[in-house]
Image (spheres, rainbow, N blue to C red):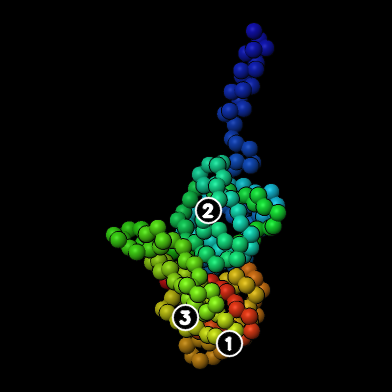
């Protein structure tokens, strides 16, 4: 009888203690698969890397956030432990997703190829969800993909009240005007890129990016030209 009571007491203690470290919900700064790459008062950017069969511990996103794939695909568990593949995953980084705050998200890489991505948290709250019939709240208003023709230069845009997200492809020698009235813009390279950036004052600078590099521009986003021969892709997040 005493042994039975002791066993029941032990089971009760096990259920009453907090979950294991694997179940603890962390900020991205405390999760080993994430590394902070950039931070200011407008946004925080993180790189996430998962090798074969690796998975993250659950993390919390307290702010609206943007996810960009650099290579590979992952499965995701939101709010629980059931993993599922999502249609917006793209191993070539064509699709960029805007996501709302969430309490618990885990990522798992079930594939042989490594997964790399960028997560950008937008520090200013987005007011789109409080606007009746705001077009960015539609099912297709949370992601932006490539242009219609993959062999042309394009800019596809998702406009939110706190950020304007531009998914850009430039063929060799092509340029695009990205000027708007934001307080600053974060450029994330989805491929290697050699670019010329021209601000409104006419000054141009040559910039060299490796895949996953980030660069902050004060004020409006610059006009960008692809100095290379091959197509290049990048995302520009302009903070409002």
Q: Quadrant of the N terminus?
A: top right
The answer to which image quadrant residue 7 occupies is top right
Determine the image quadrant of residue 193.
bottom right
**Residue at position x 65%, y 75% from top?**
192
What residue is pinned by disc 3? 178
Residue in view at x 55 percent, y 77 percent: 151
Q: Which tag is nearer the camera, tag 3 or tag 2?
A: 2
Closer-to-camera residue (68/46): 68
Q: Residue furthest left?
A: 132
Coordinates of residue 37 in the picture (x, y in percent)? 62, 65
CB contact under 8 Å: marks 3 and 1 = no
The picture places residue 65, in percent across and down from the top left corner, at 49, 60
Residue 124, given in percent of the width and then of the height, sits at 44, 64
In this view of the protein, which residue sits in the foreground, 168 or 164?
168
Residue under numbered circle 2: 86
Q: Earlier in the sequence, mark 3 or mark 1?
A: 1
Q: Where does the C terminus fall, quadrant-wise?
A: bottom left
Cα separation, mark 2 vs mark 1, equals: 35 Å
> Splitting the image into 4 quarters, where does residue 139 fall?
bottom left
Q: Residue at x 55, y 85 (%)?
A: 174
Q: Residue at x 44, y 71 (%)?
A: 157
Label 1 CA crowd tier, 10 Å (few <14, some 14–19, many 20+): few
Query: Which residue is disc 1 drawn over?
Result: 173
């Amino acid at each position: 009888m005493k042994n039975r009571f002791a066993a029941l007491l032990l089971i009760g203690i096990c259920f009453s203690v907090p979950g294991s470290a694997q179940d603890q919900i962390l900020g991205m700064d405390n999760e080993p698969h994430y590394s902070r790459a950039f931070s200011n008062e407008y946004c925080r950017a993180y790189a996430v890397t998962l090798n074969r069969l690796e998975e993250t511990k659950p993390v919390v996103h307290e702010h609206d956030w943007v996810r960009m794939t650099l290579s590979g695909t992952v499965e995701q568990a939101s709010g629980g432990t059931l993993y599922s593949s999502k249609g917006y995953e793209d191993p070539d980084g064509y699709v960029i997703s805007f996501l709302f705050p969430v309490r618990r998200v885990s990522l798992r890489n079930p594939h042989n190829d490594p997964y790399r991505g960028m997560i950008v948290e937008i520090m200013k709250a987005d007011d789109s969800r409080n606007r009746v019939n705001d077009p960015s709240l539609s099912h297709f208003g949370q992601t932006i993909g490539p242009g219609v023709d993959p062999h042309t230069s394009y800019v596809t845009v998702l406009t939110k009240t706190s950020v304007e997200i531009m998914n850009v492809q430039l063929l060799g020698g092509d340029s695009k005007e990205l000027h708007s009235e934001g307080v600053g813009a974060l450029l994330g390279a989805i491929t290697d890129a050699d670019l010329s950036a021209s601000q409104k004052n006419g000054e141009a600078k040559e910039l060299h990016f490796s895949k996953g590099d980030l660069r902050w521009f004060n004020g409006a986003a610059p006009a960008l030209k692809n100095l290379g021969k091959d197509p290049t892709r990048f995302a520009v997040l302009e903070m409002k």
